[in-house]
């Protein structure tokens, strides 16, 4: 398997997805505090065969590259312009509205959603020039402790 990590960097929090680039499937998606990112990636690397790391070229990307460089993995920075904006639309592609929620304006349904993991997914999809699907039973978790 060819596993790849994609990161949407930020000052206080980062979005991260772990995906298989052959299967075009996402296996993990999480939003976590920026200071927890290095330890999380170290643990993930111990469990998975990570081939490369894609990092959005925005806020704090240089600092994250320095933190993860010791892993000796290929680290690529990639354009992340408008990914947060695009994540709102991608959210509804991944999690379609059903039932009576269809009557509620979409903007209200995502007010409290953390879209950083979906932004990381968009960075990955743009890099690979392919849409990815979600592995069965995956949830987009927020871990801000």
Image: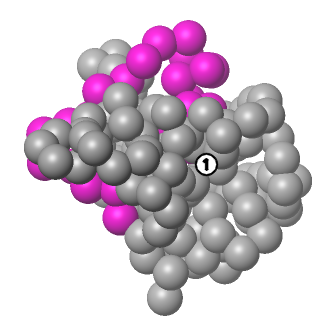
Residue reaching furthest to the top: 129
Q: Determine whether 123 is above or below 66 in the image.
A: above
**Picture quadrant where residue 106 is located:** top left
Other residues around mark 1 within 10 Å, as few (<14) / some (14–19) / many (≥20): many
Q: Residue at x 26, y 35 (%)?
A: 96
Q: Based on the picture, tell me whether residue 140 belongs to the magenta stretch.
A: yes
* x and y, in percent, of residue 8 in the image: 65, 49
- Secondary structure under tag 1 reads strand
**Picture quadrant where residue 70 is located:** bottom right
Q: Residue at x 74, y 62 (%)?
A: 10
Q: Residue at x 60, y 76 (%)?
A: 33
Of 122 and 36, which appears nearest the observer?
Answer: 122
Q: Which residues are magenta?
A: 120-141
Q: Disc 1 designates what residue?
A: 7
**Picture quadrant where residue 15 is located:** bottom right
Q: Determine whether 6 is above or below 115 in the image.
A: above
Left or right of 13? Residue 56 is right
Left or right of 58? Residue 119 is left
The quadrant of the image that shows the N terminus is: top left
Q: Based on the picture, tell me whether residue 44 belongs to the magenta stretch.
A: no
Q: Residue at x 65, y 45 (%)?
A: 84
């Amino acid at each position: 398997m060819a596993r790849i990590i994609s990161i949407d960097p930020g000052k206080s929090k980062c979005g991260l997805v772990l995906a298989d680039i052959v299967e075009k499937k996402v296996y993990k998606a999480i939003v976590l505090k920026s200071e927890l990112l290095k330890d999380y990636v170290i643990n993930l690397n111990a469990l998975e065969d990570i081939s490369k790391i894609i990092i959005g070229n925005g806020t704090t990307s240089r600092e994250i590259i320095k933190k993860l460089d010791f892993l000796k993995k290929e680290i690529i920075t990639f354009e992340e312009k408008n990914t947060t904006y695009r994540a709102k639309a991608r959210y509804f592609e991944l999690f379609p509205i059903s039932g009576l929620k269809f009557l509620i304006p979409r903007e209200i349904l995502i007010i409290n959603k953390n879209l950083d993991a979906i932004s990381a997914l968009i960075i990955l999809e743009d890099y690979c020039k392919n849409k990815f699907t979600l592995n069965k039973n995956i949830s987009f978790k927020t871990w801000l402790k």
